[in-house]
Image (cartoon, rainbow, N blue to C red):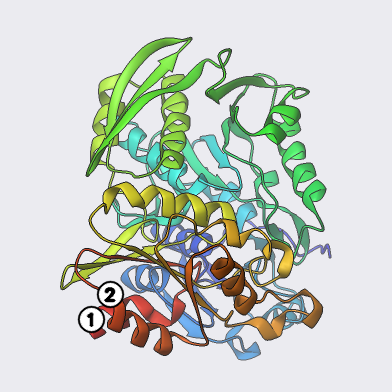
Amino acid sequence: MNSEFNHIPPNVHRVYLIAICGTGMGALACMLKELGLEVSGSDQQVYPPVSTLLKGNGITVLEGFSPSHILPDYDLVIVGNAVHSDNPEAVRMRELKLPFCSMPQAINYFAGRLTGAVKKSLVITGTHGKTTTSSLLAWILFCAGLDPTFVIGGVLRNFNSNFRTGKGPYLILEGDEYDTAYFDKGPKFMHYDPFIAILTSIEFDHADIFKDEHAVHSAFEKFIQKIRPENTLLAFDQDPTIRRLISTCRCRVYPYGLNTDSPWKLGSYHIDPPWTSFEILHDNTVWARFKTRMVGEHNLWNAVAAIAAAASLQIAVADIAKALETFEGVKRRQEVRGCKNGITVMDDFAHHPTAVRETIRAVRPFYPKGRIIAVFEPRTNSSMRNVFQNDYPLSFDAADIVCIRKPPLLHKIPLEERFSSEQLVSDLSARGIDAHFFADIDAIIAFLTTIAKSGDLILIMSNGGFDQIHEKLLKAL
């Protein structure tokens, strides 16, 4: 749905964001507030960390969606991608003929106004790892004194924020493949013009907007093809789809991974908790040695990508090393929420089968004396569908005990497409895994408080708030 009002007018002062509590929308709202604009918005089912971020920046968030929220004197309405065309606020916005735009349109427009100069975009894309890779790259640039601006889909613990308005020449963007808005069904990353792009992985996800795996591949192919010939793509060489897609792209391509002919490679590494030490090879020669508190091989790949990008920007090895050692990670990515009676409660955003598998594998070496108790909530539009029904049983092998919740929003999915948590538990049990089904978090907490013991790690995985299970569990323990 296109409209003559889908644009950003000059002299914007009063801005309203519909669905303001998405991670990207929240970051954008705070950036606009720093620009001196009057910013407000609305959302439903508001929860931290974004709600806390908005409140801390003095931004008013109205509960729910109502036509009365949309005032005729708004200069611009920014519409989040979770908003449908029949949303009462979107309907009222169109009735009043207010100018409107999408989140990536607004980022592109306003980012250059932060310093009055056009910034070079560093765009990180991929099914997995883009939030952590973006965050690490932002911290490297900050440690190198490059004063970056960034908009990232997770809260960086080093900044306690998912955005920053710096005066340096670079803008770091997490390039999401999810659709842009109800009036623009293309991926968000198609709005960005990367000076350097990173492509971490390509797998089927977002079953609500992508028909099949081919549609996902096509979206990433279009992004790759739009990168200017003079600009750079860093691409993970262990992904067969990426290898196929980059064979015909126009830009300069520098693969990273393990292949002999890739200029950037991960060398040997060893784990000595809380540190992981590793080598980076450039052109098959040891280029540098680093250490990090990030856990898991998948995070080492994220580190290689960020290091390769930093090296392309001529950042010194010493600055990269300092950043890796002091990087505190991203909230909701293997974030320890507390420890009670020797039992650690960890929060993680994992929801795709690959992410679940790699997250459990990653934490195992760091908790050798206790059990890994994996608690999983299928909540995304993909995980609530049966597209991954046969994949999830292979994701929990490294866990000792598995707790699966019934999807909380299952009524939104057509009956014939619904994921079955009960079937997953049955399949896990058939693989010899101690698995349990629960209808709600109260039952999960009651079970965990009975069986957890000192030394155990309770790893809670969901892309949502999970009804504040972390706080409630810690209190119960």
Residue 90: x and y, percent?
70, 78
Question: Residue 160 or 453: which is nearer the viewer?
Answer: 453
Q: For the image shown, how many numbered marks are present on the structure?
A: 2
* Front of the two marks 2 and 1: 2
Q: Which mark is residue 477?
A: 1
Question: Residue 134 or 94: which is nearer the viewer?
Answer: 134
Q: Which mark is residue 452?
A: 2
Residue 93: x and y, percent?
70, 78
User: Are the residues tagged 2 and 1 within 8 Å (C-beta)?
Assistant: yes
Distance between mark 2 and mark 1 Cα atoms: 9 Å
Residue 379: x and y, percent?
58, 72
- The answer to whether residue 379 of the structure is visible from this angle is no
Question: What amino acid is at disc 2?
Answer: Ala
- Would residue 391 be found to the left or right of residue 137 on screen? right
Figure quadrant of residue 339: bottom left
- Would residue 2 be found to the left or right of residue 60 on screen? right
Residue drawn at point x = 57 percent, y = 81 percent:
406
Q: Secondary structure at mark 2?
A: loop
- Would residue 121 be found to the left or right of residue 323 on screen? right
